[in-house]
């Protein structure tokens, strides 16, 4: 009788451990919690259509391009614990350097993830990334209305890989506007170069 009871207790503890580990594995970003950054560098000859507002302007430019390539991606969905009914989630990342960043997003319980992708890496005048290089401790608070329905944390690792150099290439801009904003054309240049592979 004692052996059967001990067996039942052990089986229960084992099942609970497996269930909790499965839930903890599921929580985080949909493509995983490990990211790699590769710095891409290259030079392009940008050929531009004539701008009617500046007819004497140059129709070609020599542009140095640089971009950080995030693998598997610079944005991703947050996936919460299975079965949680929530309509919002707050993510707070404490980066390895001690800085903090918070993101609030709508949550789709039917899909078990945020409605939109979270900005993990993009830094512009209007956007700030959630993560930085190193170990990021990310805590989450999920709510249904004003009621907290789930909390927890996970670690997101961001590693840097050796930089890559692309070959010099020519790129034709579709419009004069694109020549005034060559960053967009750098993105196309790296795509055409298969990200310096």
Image (cartoon, grey):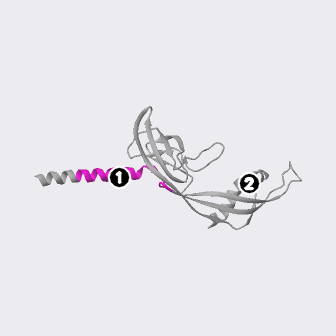
Classify mark 2: helix, strand or loop. Answer: helix
- Using the numbered discs, state the Cα–Cα distance from disc 2 to disc 1 in whole angstroms: 47 Å
**Foreground pick, 64 / 83:** 64
Residue at the image point whose x is 75% and y is 59% from the top: 63
Q: Number of labelled discs?
A: 2
Q: Is residue 59 found left or right of 87 in the rendered image?
A: right
In the rendering, at what x and y percent does residue 176 appear?
Answer: 79, 52
Q: Position of residue 133 (x, y in %)?
A: 55, 54
Q: Is residue 2 left or right of residue 42?
A: left
Q: Is residue 46 left or right of residue 195?
A: right
- Dominant SS type (magenta): helix
Q: Which mark is residue 149?
A: none
12 w.r.t. 105: above or below: below
- Whichever of labels 2 and 1 marks the residue nearer the N terminus, that label is 1
At a point 22% along the width and 53% down the height, the residue shown is: 10
Q: Please state the horizontal and vertical placement of residue 24, each as a whole percent of the image.
A: 39, 50
Picture layout, residue 4 above or below residue 91:
below
Mark 2 nearby-residue class (10 Å; few <14, some 14–19, many ≥20): some
Q: Residue at x 53, y 41 (%)?
A: 102
Q: Is residue 26 magenta?
A: yes
In the image, taking residue 11 as reference, residue 130 lies left or right, namely right
Residue 158 lies in the magenta-colored region:
no
Q: Are marks 2 and 1 in contact (CB under 8 Å)?
A: no
Residues shaded magenta: 11-34
Answer with the quarter of the image where residue 192 lies. bottom right
Task: State the residue lying farthest toward the top.
Answer: 146
> Most extreme residue toward the front, as rendered?
97
Tell which of 21 and 162 is nearer to you.
162
* SS for dot 1: helix
Which residue is label 1 attached to?
A: 21
Location of the C terminus by quadrant is bottom right
Q: What residue did someone put label 2 on? A: 182
């Amino acid at each position: 009788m004692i052996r059967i009871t001990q067996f039942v207790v052990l089986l229960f503890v084992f099942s609970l451990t497996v269930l909790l580990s499965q839930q903890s594995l599921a929580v985080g970003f949909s493509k995983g919690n490990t990211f790699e950054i590769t710095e891409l560098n290259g030079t392009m000859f940008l050929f531009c259509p004539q701008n009617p507002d500046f007819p004497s302007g140059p129709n070609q430019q020599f542009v140095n391009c640089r971009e950080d390539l995030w693998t598997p991606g610079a944005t991703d969905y947050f996936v919460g614990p299975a079965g949680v009914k929530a309509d919002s989630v707050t993510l707070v990342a404490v980066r390895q350097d001690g800085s903090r960043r918070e993101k609030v997003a709508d949550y789709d319980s039917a899909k078990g993830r945020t409605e939109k992708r979270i900005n993990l890496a993009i830094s512009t005048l209007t956007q700030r990334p959630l993560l930085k290089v190193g170990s990021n401790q990310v805590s989450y608070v999920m709510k249904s209305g004003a009621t907290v329905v789930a909390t927890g944390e996970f670690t997101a690792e961001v590693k840097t890989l050796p930089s890559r150099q692309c070959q010099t290439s020519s790129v034709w801009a579709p419009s004069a506007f694109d020549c005034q904003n060559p960053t967009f054309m750098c993105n196309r240049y790296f795509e055409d170069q298969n990200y310096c592979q």
